Image: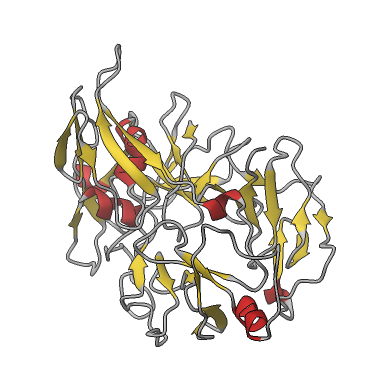
Amino acid sequence: MFSTLTLFGVLTVTFAVTNVRGECPSDTGILRLYKELGCKPVKSDAEKCATAFSCPSQIQTASKTCSVKGKTYKSGEKIPASKGSCVAECRCTEAWPNMDRSSIVCAHIDCPEFLGEPIMDGCVRQYSLDECCSVGVKCPALEEAKSQNKTTAGNTPASTSVVAKSSGFMCNVSGVQYPEGAVFYPDTPACTHCICTKDYTGSNTGPYCREISCDIELHYGSDLQEGCTPVYFGDDGCCPIQFRCPSIEDTVLKSAKESGKKIEGKEGQCTFGNLTLSIGDKLSPAEYEECVDCTCEIPPYVTSFTSSGSCVILPVGYSGSTVKVGKPKWHASIEDTVLKSAKESEKKIEGKEGQCTFGNLTLSIGDKLSPAEYEECVDCTCEIPPYVSCTKLPNC
């Protein structure tokens, strides 16, 4: 089964196959899980990078304690989350009657901007790596109007915002311009978010950047305890978008050719429920989710990610995180149509780079997908190509 999640990693871990420069690939997908769980790498003589990991058990049997990153917390005790995460507070909760283990309960932050708080045209929300929500706004247009003694009555930023003077500074990130205070997600290093500051020099490893933290044990502890494996959006995803959990219908699809990675004993095998997979073996596709590929690549967890090709899937975001609404994902359908934007977008990018693709459809910036019959509360718009951005509408 797949569980419904709230989405929300991490240092440098190793991988089984080096890239063209002879380096271990970047820290994404299942490797981030191993990092957060404190797994220890198992290396072979022929490999520069880890080919398997030894991980602590995620099965918690205690009814009055919780374990996170190897530390034990008593029932009612507060469990710290990563700095800047959208978690207000997490606590260890004693097991309910007829349940054999405790659980972790977290309160999440809903930022005004995630719920549709309006912002004046030309204004830019300001962010900090230490805060979940924006810490204010900068409005060049408002400043210019004031300097010309013009009024902007009825069109000012929300009263809760802190209006700061704009310097006009921009960060050039791979050819894209970001104003001061804006958040951006560079391609390298993987799974990193940064804030545009005047100190930015083009390097994405300075004090203005930080690795994205998944806090997997806090958000998905119950899934891990059930023996579920995380599913990532593509083979380079950062945090899980859902989990695949063991089912009695699962079977092992043996690899047609022997893997070149040989590790003796259990350390060279993946486990999923009662199944054991050798490196290269796959899990049979779930009946309701054919677009997820689950393969034993780097034991002990099965590596699962949304496959490409004919499977077109989009994660749906809401309240600053990724959640599943309606069906597990937003799939491409022959019934999909493009709703052209009524006004021309100010963001003009020539050629295919300025377009989003979804199945056989092509959308210009500002265009929307027609609502799916089973989920009218999801808005899918071409905002930052090439993927369509889908969000769940508030109060819907």
Residue drawn where x is 41% and y is 53% of the image:
239
Color theme of the render:
secondary structure
Residue 253 visible, this angle = yes
Q: Is residue 315 left or right of residue 83?
A: right
Q: Estimate the x, y position of residue 128 in percent, counting from the top left.
A: 39, 66
Q: 281 and 380: which one is in front?
A: 380
Q: Quadrant of the C terminus?
A: top right
Image point 75% across, 46% down: which residue? 333
- As drawn, the residue found furthest toward the top would be 98
Camera-side residue of 80 and 266: 80
Picture residue at 20% right of the left edge, 51% below the top? 38
- How many circles with numbers are drawn on the protein? 0
Residue 392 relative to residue 200: left or right: right
Q: Quadrant of residue 20?
A: bottom left
Q: Position of residue 326 (x, y in %)?
A: 63, 35
Q: Is residue 255 visible?
A: no
From this view, report whether residue 118 is shown above or below residue 1: below
Residue at image position (35%, 81%) is 21
Residue 75, x across and y down, in percent: 20, 28
**Could you say which is closer to the camera, residue 91 or residue 229?**
91
Q: Is residue 140 above or below residue 239?
A: below
- Residue 58 in the image, given as x and y percentages of width and height: 24, 36
117, 236: nearer the viewer: 117
